[in-house]
Amino acid sequence: MPAFTLYGARGSTNTDRVRLTLAEGGFTDYDMVFLNLPGGEQKSEEHVKRHPWGKVPVVVFPNGFTLYESRAICKYLCRKYGFQLLPPAADIEATARVEQAECTELAYFAEPAGTIVFETFAKKFIGLPTDEALVSKALRAVESFCDVVGGTLLKDQNYMAGDSFTAVDIYYIPLIQRLIACGYGDVVLSRKAVGDWWERCMSRPAIQQTLEADKKALLGAKR
């Protein structure tokens, strides 16, 4: 029996955040169930029992333990299965820096980056017009974030929480991938320190293999 079931969706940055964490941990003993978001499967009575807001991802264990919210899932899986993506709990300073970096990503990057992706990518699939003013505002916020990160944190350390690659670095990857696909990659990667950090992340074998497999699956689905 698989260790757990991961409910998610293709193209979901939140789902990909968990999948990349599992890949980095070398963990494959789980079932992946992709829900049809355009078809509304995430809002079904069955799925709302797993996630009261009817979203993805969710992990469900055979004993009934259920967890939603991608960052919480990533951290739980790291601790449960011993992925080397979080510092030891006894190292309270390193743990605090990871938590600080996690708050930084969520507070200053995820919201505006997610807005850009939704407005310029997701809306096309649901037939809604792009709010250009909202995109411009979000772009300014992402640019400001990258200016600060590139001019401070990443000048003196290799990764977002220090000199070790952590789960927090993974949190950024799906949204930056979407920004690149939407034509906004330079907004993030034009800062040398940020671009160098991105190259370090992209050079990791598990990250490369997962993204390449996703690319092949997408191309296969289009044929």
Image (cartoon, rainbow, N blue to C red):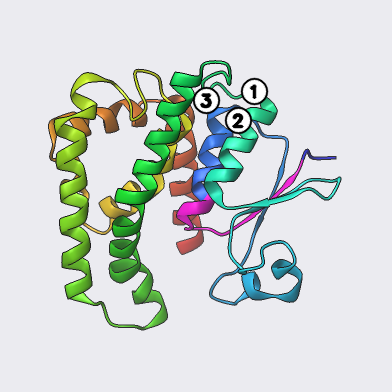
* Residue 204 magenta-highlighted: no
Q: Which residues are magenta?
A: 4-15
Label 2 to label 1: alpha-carbon separation: 5 Å
- The residue under the point 52% across, 45% down is 71
Label 3 to label 2: alpha-carbon separation: 7 Å
- The residue under the point 28% across, 54% down is 179
Q: Are marks 2 and 1 in contact (CB under 8 Å)?
A: yes
Q: In this image, 175 relative to 75: left or right?
A: left
Indicate whether 11 appears above or below 143: below
The residue beneath circle 2 is 78
- What amino acid is labelled 1 in the image? Gly
Image quadrant where residue 37 sits = bottom right
Relative image position of residue 168 (x, y in whole percent): 43, 35
In depth, the one of 188 and 140 nearer the eye is: 140
**Residue 116 shows which numbered tag?**
none
* Residue 9 magenta-highlighted: yes
- The residue under the point 64% across, 28% down is 79
Residue 42 in view (yes/no): yes
Q: In this image, 52 relative to 216: left or right?
A: right
Category of crowding for the residue at label 2, using alpha-carbon neighbours closer than 10 angstroms: few (below 14), some (14–19), many (at least 20): some
In depth, the one of 97 and 116 nearer the eye is: 97
Secondary structure under tag 1 reads loop
Image quadrant where residue 51 sits = bottom right
The residue beneath circle 3 is 86
The residue beneath circle 1 is 82
